[in-house]
Amino acid sequence: MSIPFPADSEQLRLLSEVVRELEEVEGRLRALDARKAELLAEAGRLARAEQERLPGIGGVAEMAHRTVAAEVGFALGIADRTAERLIEHAATLCSQYPATHEALADGRIAPAHTSAIVEAGRAIDAETLAVSPGARGKYAAAVLAYAEQQTPNRTRRQAKVLAARYAERSFEQRCARARVERRVWVSELDDGLAELHAVLSAPVAHALFDRLTRQARHVQAEEGAEERRLLGQIRADLLGDLLLNGAPANERGAIELGAVKARVQVTIPVLSLLPSLGHPADPLPGDDAAGRAAPASSNEPVAAAGLVGAAVLAGYGPIDGASARMLAGLATGLDRIACHPQTGAVLGVDRYRPSEEMRRFLSARDQRCRFPGCNIVPHGADQDHTIAAARGGPTTVANLSVLCRRHHMMKHHAGIGMVQRPGGEIEWTSRLGRRRRERAPGLLGRAEEATHGAAPVSAEDAPVPASAEEHRRSMARRTMQPGPHSRSDPAERVHRSDPGEPRRAA
C-alpha cells in the first residue's frame, strides 16, 4: 500500500522546505512576542510609577493605568480593557517567571505556553509564599521543563496539577470558593439559536459530556444515511430532550438509552482517601480558615513516595479531595496502581486476567493518546500494538500504547514511524525525519517533574538551526539538559514500528 510523500520524491522535498521555513518564521515570531512582553511590562511599570506620583484621592491615581491602557489599546488596535489584561500578564511573566520569558525569547515555547504557566501559577498566592517562599520557583522550574516538551493544551493541564501540588495547603479552600461560581446562563445567537452555558464541578461536567457522547453514538448508529446527524448535533438534541422531558427522544419517539452510564477516570493518591491522616489538602478539625496542615513530620515519609497530592481527573487536571472520595465511593471497583517510589512512574495494576490487566495498565500509564499534542482519554481511544501483531508483535504492555483512532490510522497509513522504549517512552518520526520524544505521563506528573521533562532530543535527531550561532546555542542547551535515558545504554531494548529498516538495540 502506497503512503503519502514517498521517500526521495519531489513532493517530500518541497514539504521539507515549507516546514523548515515555517519553523524559522515561528522562532522569529516567538522572539518578537518576548520583546512585546518586555514592552508591555515596561508600560505597566510606567503606569505604577505615575500612580505613586499622583495623589490617591478620587481615583486620580487610577487614571494613570487607564491612560497607559488606552495608549496601548490605540497602538495595537484593541480595547483598553484587553490592553490592561495584556499588561498584567506581561508584568507577571517578566517579573515572576523570568526563565519562562527567556524560553519564549529563545523560541523553546510559544506564547500560549506562557499564558498557561502564568494563569495556573496564580494558585501560588501570597498565603502560600508566606509559608513556603520557594514554592513559585519550584513550580516554575517543573512546569517549564514540561512545557518545552509538550503542547500548550497539555501544559495547561499539567500546570494546574503542579500548581496544586506546590499550593496544596489552600487547594481545598480554593475549590470551595470556586464551587460558589457554579451557574447556568443563556447567550443569544443569530438565526434562531442560543447558547446554554453551565459552570459545574469538573467531574460532573466530564461525566455529563461522556454520557451524552456515548448515547449519541448509539443514536447515530440507528439512523439511516439520509437522516444521519453529526455527533455534536445529536448531543445537543439529547441534552434538550433530557432536560425538558427527562428522557431522550426523536421523531420516532423515546429512545431507550438508560443503560448508558457516564464514565470518568480519576487517579487518587491513596492517602487522599483518608482525610483523618492530616493530608495538607484536607484540613483537620480545629484548623483555622487558612487551612493549616498537620506537622510536616507526619507527611514527609509518604510524600517522598508520591502517595500524597491532589486527585487528577483525566482530560482536566486536579480536583478536590471531597469530589475524589465521592467518586471512589460510587465506583464498583478500583484499580490499585503500583508506582516507583521516587519518580512516580506507573509500574503495574493489580488485575488478574491478563487482557483486562493490560488494558487497565495502559489507561493508568498513558492517560491519553500518546501522539504528541493529543489529549483523547483512554476510554475514547484504542490499545494499539507498536509492532503490529500481524508482523509478530507481542501483546505486552511493552508493545502496547493508547492511540486515538485518528493517530492509530495515521501510524499505519501515513508512514509515521514509532519506537517504544523502556518505561513506555515513545519516539515518533515524521515523514520528513523529524523526531519527537513522548514520555508516559506518569502518576500526577511526578515522572516529568523528576526528570525535568521528556528525554532531551539528541543532536542527530534535532533539525539543524539556520545559522552557526543558533546551532552553537542549541547544542549548548542540549548539553546542559539532564535526561534519564542515554543512547549509549547497552541494556536498552526497543520496540519499533516504522516504514524503514528496524533500528538495532544499542
Image (tube, grey):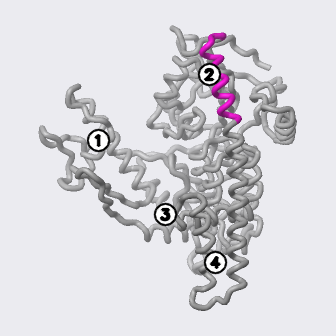
In the displayed structure, would residue 394 be above or below residue 471?
above
Residue behind mark 3:
322
Circle number at residue 64? 4
Q: Distance between the residues labelled 3 and 2?
A: 51 Å
Please give the range of residues in magenta.
8-24
Residue shown at the point (35%, 58%) measured from the top left: 197
In this rendering, which labeled residue sits more in front, label 1 or label 4?
Answer: 4
Q: Does the magenta portion include 14?
A: yes
Mark 3 vs mark 1: in front: 1
Seen from the viewer's position, the closer of residues 42 and 332 is 42
Task: Identify the residue at image location x=72%, y=75%.
Answer: 130
Q: Quadrant of residue 93?
A: bottom right
Name the residue rendered at 85%, 35% in the picture.
475
Three-letter code, disc 4: Ala
The reply, left or right, for residue 154 in relation to residue 55 is left
- Disc 2 packing (10 Å; few <14; some 14–19; many ≥20): few
Amino acid type, mark 2: Leu
Q: Which of marks 3 and 2 is nearer the N terminus?
A: 2
User: Which residue is tagged 2?
Assistant: 15
In the depicted structure, whether residue 267 falls above or below residue 380? below
> Which label's residue is closer to the chain start, 2 or 4?
2
Q: What element carries label 3?
A: helix
> Does 271 appear in magenta?
no
Could you give the CA–CA distance between mark 1 and mark 4, rounded to whole angstroms? 49 Å
Using the image as rendered, state which of residue 9 and residue 247 is in the foreground. Answer: 9
Q: Which of marks 3 and 4 is in front?
A: 4
